[in-house]
């Protein structure tokens, strides 16, 4: 039988973990199958000085109704997550993942100056994102976002997120200043469909508010830079970029590497999609695909696998 002493409150009761804040992030793939990473400022509130995918927290004003804390949709792909992914990519890189109402193609019908003005207005909260799209005659291309895992910050971390990751493939039939230089004498649009050409604007940082640089590189080159300690990649960025490295731009090993043909780039994308969507197996047990997987890293204490704490 228990006694009153058994029910004394703990002197230091365990803290209730912070509620994860809904957010969305995009692995943006260039017309030459390279991936965009942004360099965070050193004073950023999260992922300081690291290289990250464009993304951020959901906004009810811009993105629509956000599922309540106890609603199953809080941790599932949904309209608000997709809208936030498009909006945050625009705010942070200047690339608008939207389609023209006139042509049905990727929207590029405003000048660089007008695009930057709209970008700053949305970021500052002066203009609602959907109102800006209506003004420009564009619709957010949420249907082309491909789910690629959800990440939930471990409960022992003070600032937590439940982040829906997506992949977005920019059209192969487009030109972009992000591609590697081709050998001397190669025509500017070799390997690309000139008839349906779309010019993708240079990815740019947000003026130093959250990022200081924006750059496309092959996944394997980002991993090489991280392993050489030249850049910081946190677990989500390192793991997902590593997963894509065998499938996208794997033949690009230097700035002088030739741009693969459109057919070769399309084959890379098809193999990547097959990898993303097919069910996985571990020790004979079926697991969900990476499109539906939910990941929450565990921080290992000192002495468990070496002297330093590390992510597991």
Image (tube, rainbow, N blue to C red):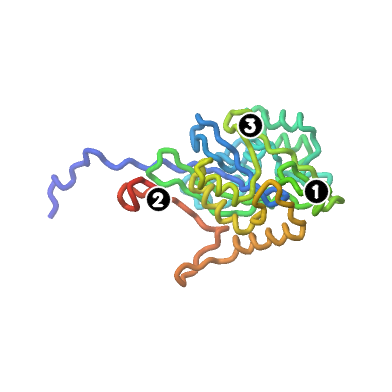
| Residue picked out by circle 2 | 298
Q: Which of marks 2 and 1 is nearer the N terminus?
A: 1
Per the model, the C-alpha gap separating discs 2 and 1 is 44 Å
- Separation of marks 2 and 3 at Cα, in angstroms: 32 Å
Q: Quadrant of the N terminus?
A: bottom left
- Dot 1: within a 10 Å radius of its alpha carbon, few (fewer than 14), some, or many (20 or more) residues? few
Residue occupied by mark 1: 104
| Residue 163, image x, y percentages | 53, 46
Q: How crowded is mark 2: few (under 14 residues within 10 Å), some or many (20 or more)?
A: few
Residue 50 lies left or right of residue 249; in this view the side is left
Q: Nearer the viewer, mark 3 or mark 1?
A: 3
Q: Residue at x 75, y 37 (%)?
A: 134
Q: Which of marks 3 and 1 is nearer the N terminus?
A: 1
**Mark toward the start of the polypeptide (2 vs 3):** 3
Circles 2, 1 touching at the beta carbon (< 8 Å): no
Give the structural element (helix, strand or loop) at label 1: loop
Task: Please name the residue that numbered disc 3 is placed on.
Answer: 206
Image coordinates for residue 21, horizontal then vertical, percent: 49, 41
Residue 220 in percent (x, y) is at: 59, 52
């Amino acid at each position: 039988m228990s006694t009153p002493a058994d029910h004394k409150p703990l002197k230091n009761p365990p803290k209730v973990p912070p509620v994860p804040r809904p957010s969305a992030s995009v692995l943006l793939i260039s017309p030459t199958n390279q991936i965009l990473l942004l360099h965070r400022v050193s004073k950023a509130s999260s992922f300081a000085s690291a290289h990250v995918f464009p993304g951020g927290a959901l906004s009810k004003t811009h993105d629509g109704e956000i599922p309540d804390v106890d609603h199953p949709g809080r941790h599932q792909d949904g309209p608000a997550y997709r809208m936030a992914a498009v909006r945050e990519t625009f705010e942070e890189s200047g690339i608008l993942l939207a389609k023209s109402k006139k042509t049905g193609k990727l929207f590029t019908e405003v000048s660089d100056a007008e695009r930057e003005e709209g970008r700053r207005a949305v970021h500052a909260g002066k203009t609602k994102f959907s109102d800006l799209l209506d003004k420009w005659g564009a619709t957010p291309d949420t249907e082309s976002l491909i789910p690629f895992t959800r990440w939930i910050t471990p409960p022992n971390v003070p600032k937590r997120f439940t982040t829906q990751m997506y992949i977005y493939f920019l059209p192969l039939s487009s030109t972009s200043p992000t591609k590697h230089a081709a050998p001397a004498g190669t025509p500017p649009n070799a390997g690309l469909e000139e008839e349906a050409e779309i010019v993708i604007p240079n990815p740019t940082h947000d003026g130093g508010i959250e990022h200081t640089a924006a750059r496309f590189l092959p996944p394997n080159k980002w991993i090489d830079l991280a392993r050489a300690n030249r850049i910081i990649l946190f677990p989500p960025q390192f793991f997902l970029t590593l997963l894509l490295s065998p499938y996208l731009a794997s033949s690009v090993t230097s700035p002088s590497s030739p741009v693969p043909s459109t057919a070769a780039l399309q084959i890379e994308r098809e193999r990547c999609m097959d990898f993303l969507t097919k069910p996985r197996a571990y020790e004979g047990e079926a697991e969900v695909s990476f499109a539906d997987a939910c990941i929450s890293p565990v921080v290992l204490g000192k002495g468990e696998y070496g002297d330093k704490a590390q992510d597991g």
